[in-house]
Image (cartoon, coloured by chain):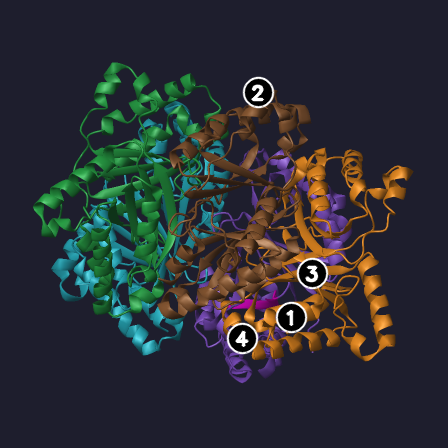
Chain colours: A cyan, B purple, C green, D orange, E brown
Amino acid sequence: MRYLSTVILSLTFVFSTVGHVKAEADREKLLKEAGVYATFAVFKASEQWWHVEPHTRALATTDVKKLLTTYGDKLTADMYLLRGLSERADILIRIHSKEMVHNQNFLVDMMATGFGKYFTQVNAFNGITKALNYVPNFPDELKTELKTPPPQGSTYVVVVPIQKDAEWWTTSQDARIRMMKEHTDATVAYLKTVKRKLYHSSGLDDWDFITYFETSELSDFNNLVTGLLQVKENRHNRTFGSPLLLGTIRPLDEILEILAR
Amino acid sequence: MRYLSTVILSLTFVFSTVGHVKAEADREKLLKEAGVYATFAVFKASEQWWHVEPHTRALATTDVKKLLTTYGDKLTADMYLLRGLSERADILIRIHSKEMVHNQNFLVDMMATGFGKYFTQVNAFNGITKALNYVPNFPDELKTELKTPPPQGSTYVVVVPIQKDAEWWTTSQDARIRMMKEHTDATVAYLKTVKRKLYHSSGLDDWDFITYFETSELSDFNNLVTGLLQVKENRHNRTFGSPLLLGTIRPLDEILEILAR
Amino acid sequence: MRYLSTVILSLTFVFSTVGHVKAEADREKLLKEAGVYATFAVFKASEQWWHVEPHTRALATTDVKKLLTTYGDKLTADMYLLRGLSERADILIRIHSKEMVHNQNFLVDMMATGFGKYFTQVNAFNGITKALNYVPNFPDELKTELKTPPPQGSTYVVVVPIQKDAEWWTTSQDARIRMMKEHTDATVAYLKTVKRKLYHSSGLDDWDFITYFETSELSDFNNLVTGLLQVKENRHNRTFGSPLLLGTIRPLDEILEILAR
Amino acid sequence: MRYLSTVILSLTFVFSTVGHVKAEADREKLLKEAGVYATFAVFKASEQWWHVEPHTRALATTDVKKLLTTYGDKLTADMYLLRGLSERADILIRIHSKEMVHNQNFLVDMMATGFGKYFTQVNAFNGITKALNYVPNFPDELKTELKTPPPQGSTYVVVVPIQKDAEWWTTSQDARIRMMKEHTDATVAYLKTVKRKLYHSSGLDDWDFITYFETSELSDFNNLVTGLLQVKENRHNRTFGSPLLLGTIRPLDEILEILAR
Amino acid sequence: MRYLSTVILSLTFVFSTVGHVKAEADREKLLKEAGVYATFAVFKASEQWWHVEPHTRALATTDVKKLLTTYGDKLTADMYLLRGLSERADILIRIHSKEMVHNQNFLVDMMATGFGKYFTQVNAFNGITKALNYVPNFPDELKTELKTPPPQGSTYVVVVPIQKDAEWWTTSQDARIRMMKEHTDATVAYLKTVKRKLYHSSGLDDWDFITYFETSELSDFNNLVTGLLQVKENRHNRTFGSPLLLGTIRPLDEILEILAR
């Protein structure tokens, strides 16, 4: 069975519709507000994991579910399956909360479970959500375009960490607005099929931005990125990806079942 | 026994000529159409694998064959032997399907077999096939040359991932057409001995293109690449290879036998 | 239970208030004086550690405490929790003493304990504290601003190693003072919420400076770093981070308990 | 006992002088002809190897010798000892044959022996020999100098893979001839003490050239390389080494005995 | 107990004063002559080492001592302790002899001992000593300064491998002399507290120079390096360190005891 929207890890769903509605509201708020801290924690199962009995592995995955319930009032955590499409990584956990320390507490506890102790963390991208920086200066027409509702229930997730060069940062705000308008113009055609979210990382990680995308049309996404490579702002990307993470959005149970297979 | 063309992993061959003809037609279609998703999954056997009994290893390889049959209606998967010629990698599996999620499902299942759990994934290149971009603007003579039938039954495979620099992407389409014509002119002499295929990767991976080659004449291939290094477009290759993968095209059974030896 | 200031590893606290007052005074002196040698030793627990019995792990952590008492008269050592927020690293130990050899002796002994032998050192940043270099040339107003008392009892620690480029070092002292004034102006707004400390590393490590920060407001810290990226001096940062370390400041007992969980 | 020339792995020597003479002639031909494919396979023994009983290790090395006899009619394979002088690598095997697939078959079989399964391949440089490119355009005097017989029975081997930059490749042939003449002039003084051999790698590997040297005078070799760094062509070396491999030329039996010690 | 000068590994000391005097004289000669080959071999103990019984480890270290006696007439070998101060490395062995093959033989034998087989080699820097290159062209006053006797019995060792850029090597000898004079002027103030030694590496390793320093005043050393960063010659350092190695000079017995602790 597959959820219509992205995977919701809140297990309160099982026990109480009221609780679920509240948790879902909290989740939606966390995913929309500014000032929310996100950690993208990427893991690779150790070789030993795959040699543990499937039954024992299945049991171990229940620890993760319990932990998600415990932390349900402090944060949201979405799990994605990277295995096969992104070398060296199996899963991505995207965590949102009002304080970075909650993200750490959850991760530390997750890694201490019978499941987590077989997984090696290979990346930790940290970021914060902020009010839009350049959009207020865009023409009204573009602002209206940007209100296009993003797609729901997408199949794929892509995460691209970005570091800008020193020239970008020392360029005047006006010149950056012009470049970001050109950048944004190139995205308009894809607003219906690609959902985007931006995290600011300078000082919290070795990146300046973590860009997060959901889509069911990878062909569109390839065209979108090709379009973004062709605008002047691209000259100021010191790194774009490296690693870019491509994975799939699936119900938590399906991902855990795959890992226990 | 060696197939005339590249290795066909579809085991339906064994059971039904009719099924085989259909599978082969599907395969040819997948290999020619635009909008097809490819994953180049590169694996290295763990040290433990080589210490497992040959008999047990031989048994394990049968799991891979069964899996190929199961997925036969969703995708094609070609296996190549890199061991010895490409440091740190033993095999390359090239998968084509109409949806990237099929590629992932196959890989996840393959890695969960008694065979797969001894192999570590060291690369995953993802791409999509597209209609030709520059060729429509080439002179008719060159277009005719490009219809030269590629070689069949080649011995070697070479995979070269490429990332272009920001200057390339922000150069006008016209200037890029001129550079790509010069690039293509340099390939004409090798159309008969080198088969080429292009995948677009921007946004799906940390590359812009995955270039795939088959040849029986590595000497020709070395000359071809040397020629390509000498055209202006080469100045815009931020990376060319790194890793370049060189391997051999052999029947699946031969590769699996080598790995079980 | 949580200390108001950063974690104090001196266990003499437990036995003697007088001893503690002296140790604390020594510590404050070490943290303020010029000519003090610091080592930032970063560790990752091996996979085996997490498979050792929790009880045995808890016992092992007592070795670390004993060692801190033994070395209490020679150095201060602060432990921070990086696990989850910084890929591949679990803890950071920041050591200050009057001679680098003390730092090494402590680390060698720590790594030989039942605790330490399960931890792999992944970074060693070495530095020395010095009298302020550029500040004496700043305008009085700025000098006064810089006397703003830093925050106490912060939640987060960030360590950013920096390497300047050759152009920076061969630029005249005057031009560097001007650039550092612009840099310092950008920090004034954050003096109340971000505590800073600078270590000089040229010749002691592959860095020129180790910058150390404490804050409870990561949002402010992100703004501060974004501001520093926008001044001209940023053009001369050959590396800024890579790795940047983000962690939390917690009582030693809490960190050790987390590692034994 | 030490051979006068480089190590000859052909064990037919033991059984038949006639066979040996033929094998030696084949070998000399392979080492001199154009169109010969070379693979430089570099290996590091796993930690376990050194914990295997010396007696068992000695037995394992005999597998390598048998394999060399089996492949004697298809290829030559020279083994060198890198251990100690080149970090992370223990041995280098240089293989020459008329088809790259022979090199792979040999390596695959070698790695499947009781010896090979304890060794991890850390590099594979592939190349092809070609007729001289620039020499035909050199002045007669220099051509005569180049006929100086190289040294025999050298103690040391050095392998330097090289990648040229895009500017080199897009420079006119004439300008490249001039630069290569200057390069070659710098080598004349060392023709008597340093033996050189060139392999072309573009498209077969992530290098453009593999340069191979034998010498008994490392001091001369250091002077030679210093001279080559001082000519204009050096500006077009994107990489020169990284890794450079330094090792010793010893009889196969001595190397195998050292590895079994 | 601590030697006044750097650690002398020659164990002949124990048995014969006469032998010692000769060995010491040989050692002094090797450390001063031109044309001497040096290998800086850097090792990290494997995780297993620390889980071996202390008693067994102590026994294993005696193998190293025996080996040093055996090779005493061919080479000198100094061991330094890097553990804790240089990530990933525990010890550095600096070897001097008249032929690089002696360095290799010693290392191969050392790595085959009960001690060595638990250590992984992480670096091998190879170099040769030469007559001074630029000094003969310096003014007499500077030449006199350079005769300042270096410090004896220092506490710390620093090793910095350096690679110059192509511009350096293609700059005229005169311009290089001017830059090296400026470089040397910056060192004069530190001749009394910092001992220096230079090794030439081009062609023997992926470096051009290995610079070796001994000092008891790391603060002075930091100032010295900061001064060297400020001269024009620094613009031509493609790499300076990476890795820079910082360690301590201690008697062999103390280092071995620390490793057996």
x and y, in percent, of residue E115 in the image:
47, 65
Q: What residue appears at the point 86 percent right and 47 percent down from the top-left corner? A: D148
- Asked if marks 4 and 1 fall on the same chain, the answer is no
**Near-viewer residue (C55 or B251):** C55
Q: Can see residue A125?
A: no
x and y, in percent, of residue D219 in the image:
70, 45
* Image position of D193 with respect to D118: above or below: above
Residue that badge 3 annotates? D39
Q: Which residues are magenta?
A: B72-83
- Asked if marks 3 and 2 fall on the same chain, the answer is no
Q: Which mark is residue E141?
A: 2
Find out whether the residues at labels 4 and 3 contact each other: C-beta distance under 8 Å. Answer: no
x and y, in percent, of residue D247 in the image:
65, 57
**Near-viewer residue (C23 or C95):** C23
Looking at the picture, which amino acid does disc 3 mark? Answer: Thr
Residue that badge 4 annotates? B50
Find out whether the residues at labels 2 and 1 contact each other: C-beta distance under 8 Å. Answer: no
Q: Which mark is residue D256?
A: 1
Distance from the alpha carbon under mark 4 to that under mark 1: 21 Å
Looking at the picture, which amino acid does disc 1 mark? Answer: Leu
Query: Label 1 neighbourhood size at 10 Å, few (<14), some (14-19), many (20+)?
Result: many
Distance from the alpha carbon under mark 4 to that under mark 3: 23 Å
Distance from the alpha carbon under mark 1 to that under mark 3: 20 Å
Q: Is residue B185 left or right of residue E28?
A: right
